[in-house]
Amino acid sequence: MGQILHGSATTTEAVRRAIQHSQESLRALAKRYGINTKTVSKWKKRSSVADVPTGPKEPKSTVLSVEEEAIIVAFRKHTLLPLDDCLYALQATIPHLTRSSLHRCLQRHGISRLPDVEGDKPAKKKFKSYPIGYFHVDIAEVQTAEGKLYLYVAIDRTSKFAFVQLVKKTGRTSASAFLVALIEAVPYKIHTVLTDNGIQFTFPPRYADGPTARYMTHMFDMRCSENGIEHRLTKVKHPWTNGQVERMNRTIKEATVKRYHYDRHEQLETHLSDFINAYNFARRLKTLKGLTPYEFICKCWTNEPERFKIDPIHQMPGLNILGGAIKLIGFVGACPVGNRLSTVVQLTSLGMLCFFFLSIIAMVMHPRCAATWLPQMLRPPCSTGGAGLAHLAQVFQAAK
């Protein structure tokens, strides 16, 4: 087997061995082999003729500091997230972190591979690619202290945009109303909806045949036909066909009802609204190459504007200045004013109220804020929050 030497080597293993066994002076050996006396001295002092590793004794990053590496290692060991998920979560704290530097850091600390807890898995087949507008729809049950609720969930197969709605009763009417709300909430055209064979979405098989079958149309199918949507059904007893929305149901439950207790339905609805907004506008997904669902939709708007009904930028959430001010107005109006409230507290409350009114005026005049709060306030109540002008009037009435 031949010798493998580094590119800058000036001696072979035989020359090094001869130098180590020779009794001649350094200068004589350097002249004989045509090398520097320092090289001769180096090999004289060594007991081996093999090359030693070059570089620092303890490998370290030239990009990450010791503290940043400690953060990365602790995060990986605590969460056991994949490489890309770690990257998306840590880039907010370490902006200069790249995928390659993160991978090298995990390799240095011996945690680049996650433990295989489920054994070898077969290779997953890729989903057939579709343009945006293909929604998977399903129903799940959730519980609060007040009782049971039904959760309608829809997720786009391509953009991963999610939409949910809580109802007290499930049936054809609520399923049709959910589809209408979904169409209004999505800025682009929906071309296909995939559901299971539940009675909320289609008639039972015994009604599919017979002389009157062609005269019967399910309410959900009617809404689909009115909006030019193709309604597809999963194969009977094959729930994994609708696996994307099944997985979304699990994600929602793990973040809400399986982790927290809710005394009222309103608490669950508020938390669910916050979670879905954070998912759509802030969660970066590996399947979208690090984009959020909203960012992916905006990218599709740039490439295929003909698929859209409105500009998705108009749906970007802005600063919630009005919401905070309205809550303050309600709080100040509910405070007892009289002998139990001192003059200092009254003046302080009045000053805070005036300050927030001035803040509202200043922020509303900003172009970006004006473009977001007005449509939100004029929009009718929807499944994920927002009470419109009627709620605003009630709050002002209660504050008087």
Image (spheres, rainbow, N blue to C red):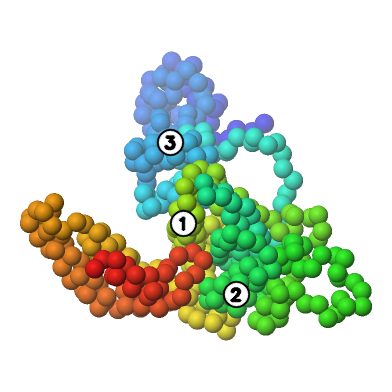
x, y percentage for residue 269? 48, 57
Task: Write down the residue under mark 3.
Answer: 74
Where, by quadrant of the figure, is residue 335 drawn?
Answer: bottom left
In this view, 5 is above or below 226: above
Q: Is residue 222 left or right of residue 74?
A: right
Amino acid under label 3?
Ala
Residue ID at (75%, 55%): 239
Q: Which mark is residue 266?
A: 1
Q: Earlier in the sequence, mark 1 or mark 2?
A: 2
Q: Which mark is residue 135?
A: none
* Residue 24 in view of the camera: yes
x, y percentage for residue 201? 72, 67
Residue ID at (63%, 67%): 174
User: Mark 2, mark 3: which one is toward the viewer?
Assistant: 2
Q: Are marks 2 and 3 in contact (CB under 8 Å)?
A: no
Task: Write down the residue under mark 2.
Answer: 180
